[in-house]
Amino acid sequence: MPFHHELGGVEDTLSDLALLDLLTGPMPPPVKGRYRRRDEDLDPLMLAAAAASPHITRNHYAHDFFPGVEDPRKESSYDWTNWKPEDPTERQERRPRLKYESRQAPRSQRLKKLGLEGQEGKENGTKAREVTDPLRRAENLPPAAQRDAHVSPQAAPPTSSTSTTSLPTQVTAPLEVKCMARTRVPTPHGPVFLHLYHNNHDNKEHLAIVVDPAQFQEDSPSLAPPIRSRSLDAVWSEDETEMERITRGAYVGRLSATSQKSSSPVDPQTNITTDAIPSPLVRIHSECFTGETIGSMRCDCGEQLDEAIRQISQPISIPSSSISTPPTTIPGRGAVIYLRQEGRGIGLLSKIRAYNLQDLGHDTVTANIMLGHKADERGYEIAGAILRDLGLGTKTGEGIRLLTNNPDKVQALEKEGIRIVERVMMLPRSWQCRQSDQLVVKNSKEVGATMIGGGAVYGEDLDKYLRTKVLRMGHMLPLLSEEDLL
Ligand SMILES: Nc1nc2c(ncn2[C@@H]2O[C@H](COP(=O)(O)OP(=O)(O)OP(=O)(O)O)[C@@H](O)[C@H]2O)c(=O)[nH]1
């Protein structure tokens, strides 16, 4: 029979009374030699207190019976009657885990998607695979190349008796580069001509930093041929005006208000080389935002870029043929081909992630691989084409002395038909110091060490620029007089 008793707004039932009885009844005698545990399966006192007023006792309740709950107050209206002890396997699953996944489906799956399952392994040798492998020709090409690629069933002849004759083969348009603009840029190592290139294989603007200040000395003929872009000096259209040519950089000498002489197209037959002049120094440099722009000291990229421009700009001494005449000195000449291959081709986003993996203890190669990339994803076809456009490393023209420590780069450029007459090592500056004098390293400058020039920037062009900012744009700088600047 139900027993009802109103107490403070709480309705008591028979079960409540039974519980009360249990609580107020005599305690069982303690077992000798054993302490009473507070976390028994059912602590009647706690249970009763919780049932009577959960809001008051929740902290105790959770603390003693639910160690898995961090802060019970966060749970506000949680219904504790639904609580179940945590399954250790379930808990394991909920834990966030770091996992690296390849962004590319397995090769067999990709072939299947293209309807080419079973074709893998049929071609003999790498060359055959390179020509006929659709995976290399479509998916792996950057968007511009995909747009330009033609699909032709007969385009590529079979390379072996078992090769995929009936397969549609995607043929990429032959690589073409075009220098879109060129300008003079004064640097701490001397003036350079910056060339901006477009190409039909990727959407990137690759650059060539040409060092050839002899081009400024229009009056005295240079002993060495000028390093000029064939595609820039070409006539682009019959309607092109003199001003348009000059604006895109197709001029000779140094531009000024009084000197504006547009260039003539380079005759492809003229390839002047003199054995007496050392071949131009060339560096193929891959973009590194961190090293070159924010002075990261995780790599030596900034220093290498600076060192390359410095070395190329050094005057060249040409020994004379007779003992009576002194050696001749000509201005330094060569080029840095600056490729937009950030992070060895994996891009800045992945490189940033790779740095975090490196902080966890992985090296630069493993970090790339963990992110689903190759250790090095760079190609040098565009570099080869730019060099040819500048008349460097061609079969009939000047060979190049390549500034690099990377044997793959040498091999890849030679494969592109570039004639490398010498490989010139790039010894990191800190290693040079270490070899000569321990003290120099200790006292060497760290701030700005990776920046081009690494010191105070000054010069005629900078002064002009700063004066304009003061005079035209209201920049708050004390303006020096023309005499002060001399
Ligand atoms: N993925 C990745 N790229 C890096 C890292 N450090 C520098 N790079 C990139 O590496 C490229 C330069 O390559 P390096 O291996 O330093 O030199 P290299 O061009 O192969 O060889 P050298 O001609 O001897 O300088 C640049 O694109 C940098 O952005 C890194 O830790 N991870």
Image (cartoon, helix red, strand yellow):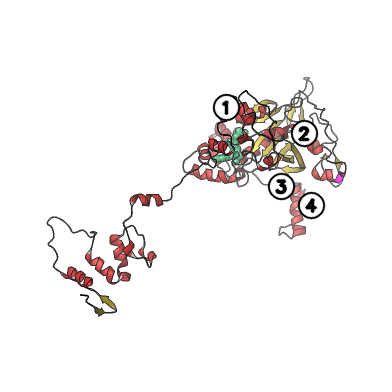
**Residue 114 occupies which quadrant of the picture?**
top right
Vertical placement of 389 versus 351: above or below? above
Contact (CB < 8 A) between labels 2 and 1?
no
Q: Amino acid at mark 3?
A: Tyr
Q: Secondary structure at mark 3?
A: loop
Mark 4: few, some, or many residues within 10 Å (few <14, many ≥20)? few
Q: Position of residue 13 (x, y in %)?
A: 24, 74
**Residue 235 occupies which quadrant of the picture?**
top right
- Mark 2 against mark 1, which lies toward the viewer? 1
Q: Between residue 360 and residue 238, name the one nearer to us.
A: 238
Q: Which label is found at residue 227?
A: 2
State left or right for residue 314 relative to residue 448: right
The residue located at (57%, 32%) in the rendering is 436
Q: Which residue is mark 3?
A: 458
Q: CA distance from mark 3 to mark 1?
A: 63 Å
Check mark 4 vs ligand 1: CB closer than 8 Å? yes or no: no
Vertical placement of 239 versus 472: above or below? above
For the stretch drawn in magenta, what is the main secondary structure?
Answer: loop
Q: Amino acid at mark 2?
A: Ile
Q: Amino acid at mark 4?
A: Glu
Q: Secondary structure at mark 4?
A: helix
Q: Which residue is mark 4?
A: 482
Q: Amino acid at mark 1?
A: Lys
Mark 2: few, some, or many residues within 10 Å (few <14, many ≥20)? many
Q: Which residue is mark 1?
A: 122
Contact (CB < 8 A) between labels 2 and 3?
no
Mark 3: few, some, or many residues within 10 Å (few <14, many ≥20)? few
